[in-house]
Amino acid sequence: MKTVISGVTIKSISACVPQNKVDLASFYDIFGEKEVQRIVASSGISSIRVATQSETTSDMCVKASEIVLEKRDRASIGAIVFVSQTPDYILPATAATLQNRLDLPKSVVTYDVCSGCTGYIHGLFLSAMLSSSMSCDVLLCTGDTISKHISDQDRSLRLIMGDAGTASIIGPAADKEMFFRFFTDGSRYSSLIIPAGGARDPYNEKNASVTERENGNSRSDRHLFMDGMEIMKFALSDVARLVGQSMKDEREEIDIYAFHQANKFIVDALSKNLKLDKEKVLLAVDGYGNTGPASIPVALCHCLANSEKNINHRGKGLFAGFGVGLSAGTAVVDLAECDICPVVESDRH
Amino acid sequence: MNSKIISKIAELVEENSENVALSSVLNDFDAWDSLAKVSFLVFASTEYGVQLGGVDFEKASTVSDLCNLITEKKNENSN
């Protein structure tokens, strides 16, 4: 089902990554040089950004938000949406704390949304609805510090996932519209999961124990688990189908495809599967890793800020997020007047 | 088609094509691991437009089984 939200657009986007850069060659000792190189060749990721122990997703979102708010009247912000699986606290919601940290009006309505790699699309949809119904600007923050939930002995995730936080302003624009499509299949919830720590399996001695699991990877139930084969099947079937449908939603030609940056392997496979012009498909995985709900804005900021494309070739963008849930979502957005800022590094923590 | 599949499997398991035959047992290759399997799914999808990855894929023990599986799925698609 296609949903259209009229009269709103993305006004600006910024992204912040941790200052701490980790070269994957530093994992030769743990996983072996040959194995690391084999994964790097396929993932296209030779280094990742990893938050320090005291650095949270919201810290990076605050830095990114300061950039998009700089040229804006803060009183225009009517809502804050924070999309993350790594909030600051169990409660209160991080979005509420952002009101204070960013000195935004106390009249704002705030939402935390728990979503991963589909998160930017989930957040964009909610922000566009809020902006449309409230006739105000909405601050959308997305990101994760998922590295804190990954086992050091799980090469399938440790060598792939990175941390980041982003900020976008969604606001009224009379002649613009956005198209959305969504897909959710909760039967496959266990394909990407942190099983312990929630109400279903609270922290206990058993779920703290690290044991050897599939493919020689070791982790506990408190760590993130990903069934790579299931996710790839999902990307090539349901996600490809959803993107294919979304391509027909827009009468004009799509200029930019910004897919969730899981890794080079998946982005390439999706592009090939959909027979897309490679020039139009953004890729920004090297130096960042898979940054979950931050990956689409990170790709936009990395590839389009300060580039010729920023001015000349930017028109319609098709975004696609997919992953945990399992879920997927697409958005077709006019980027012609969007202010896309370069990726910045976090302050030292 | 089969020779193309054989050379893809050879590439994935880091062997010369001469060392991979239709009768080769996939698990005999050290490098036939999860990454190689996922790569093979992508190959089948982009090259032949078929979705593998079900129980049939897990049960395939030889190169020949994979070739037959792709042929089967292709026929299903065209029917």
Image (tube, coloured by chain):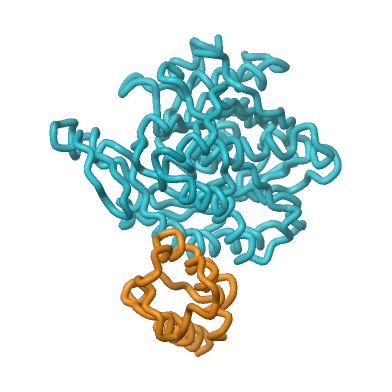
Chain colours: A cyan, B orange
- Horizontal side of A38 relative to B29 (left or right) equals right
B58 left or right, relative to A236: left
Picture quadrant of residue A298:
top right
Residue A86 in picture, x, y percent from top left = 40, 29
Residue B20, relative to residue A176: is it above or below? below
B17 relative to A247, above or below: below
Left or right for A127, reference A309 = left
Q: Is residue A340 visible?
A: yes
Between A64 and A5, the residue placed more toward the observer is: A64
**Which residue occupies the foreground of this view, A235 or B66?**
B66
Regarding residue A3, the answer to whether it shows in the image is no
Q: Residue at x 72, y 17 (%)?
A: A71
Residue at (47% x, 42% y) in the render: A159
Q: Position of residue A175 (x, y in %)?
A: 75, 41
Q: Nearer the viewer, residue A25 or A103?
A: A25
Q: Quadrant of residue A289?
A: top right
Residue at 68 percent of width and 36 percent of height = A302
Could you tell me residue A127's position as x and y percent? 55, 34
The image shows a total of numbered marks equal to 0
Q: In the image, residue A295 lies at what x, y percent?
A: 56, 39
Q: Residue furthest left?
A: A205
